[in-house]
């Protein structure tokens, strides 16, 4: 998807690091919150929403991960500005974070969870399309869907 959107060289390497490490900040979130089977309380949700900042702080300690740190911090931002932790919107969100957001959502939708069954690939495609322009960058959704469809051909 990164290549399809024009990322090259160091940008693709940074995207790879950030993609692998995007949820590393969850190690600072208590297990009882991470593994809670039911809905989170407001306080628990606030703690969970800190994981992008926790992850970015951890990655900033290593010079070669500093660029990935800001991507990790932004991976829960939403294209319409309603995400977290900073409420960034549109092009304010690094393109790499916009890519990770789409890929992570697709992975979550197509994976079984304790509280729901996995969606089919087609259902996940429809959900991504439905949220393009609000949760997701429409360009990224289109690029991701074309990559997946090309890999199925």
Image (spheres, grey):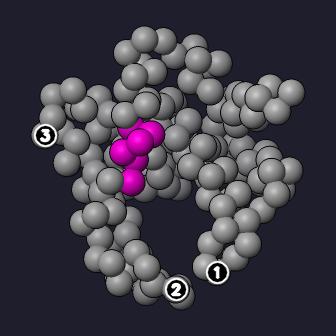
x and y, in percent, of residue 47 in the image: 32, 72
Per the rendering, the mark at residue 72 is none
Query: Is the residue 112 above or below the residue 44 in the image?
Result: above
Residue 29 found in image quarter: bottom left
Query: Whole-percent x and y of residue 103?
Result: 60, 43
Using the rendered view, name the quadrant where residue 36 is placed: bottom left
Q: Earlier in the sequence, mark 1 or mark 3?
A: 3
How far is mark 1 from mark 3, CA to CA? Answer: 36 Å
Mark 1–mark 2 Cα distance, whole angstroms, equals 7 Å
Q: Is residue 74 left or right of residue 127?
A: left
In the picture of the structure, the residue carrying the numbered disc 3 is: 61
Secondary element at tag 2? loop
Q: Earlier in the sequence, mark 3 or mark 2?
A: 2
Q: Residue at x 70, y 76 (%)?
A: 116
For label 1, the residue is 115
Taking the magenta stretch, the answer to whether it contains residue 20 is: yes
The residue tagged 2 is 37
Q: In the rendered view, would you say 104 is above or below 2?
A: below
- Quadrant containing the N terminus in the rendered view: top right
Range shown magenta: 18-23
């Amino acid at each position: 998807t990164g290549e399809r959107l024009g990322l090259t060289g160091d940008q693709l390497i940074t995207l790879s690091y950030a993609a692998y490490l995007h949820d590393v900040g969850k190690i600072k979130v208590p297990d009882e919150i991470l593994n809670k089977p039911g809905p989170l309380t407001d306080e628990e949700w606030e703690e969970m929403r800190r994981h992008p900042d926790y992850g970015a702080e951890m990655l900033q300690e290593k010079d070669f991960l500093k660029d990935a740190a800001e991507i990790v911090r932004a991976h829960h931002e939403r294209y319409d500005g309603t995400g977290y932790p900073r409420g960034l919107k549109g092009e304010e969100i690094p393109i790499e974070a916009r890519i990770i957001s789409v890929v992570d959502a697709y992975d979550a939708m197509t994976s079984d969870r304790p509280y729901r069954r996995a969606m089919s690939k087609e259902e996940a495609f429809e959900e991504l399309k439905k949220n393009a322009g609000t949760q997701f960058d429409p360009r990224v959704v289109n690029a991701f869907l074309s990559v997946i469809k090309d890999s199925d051909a």
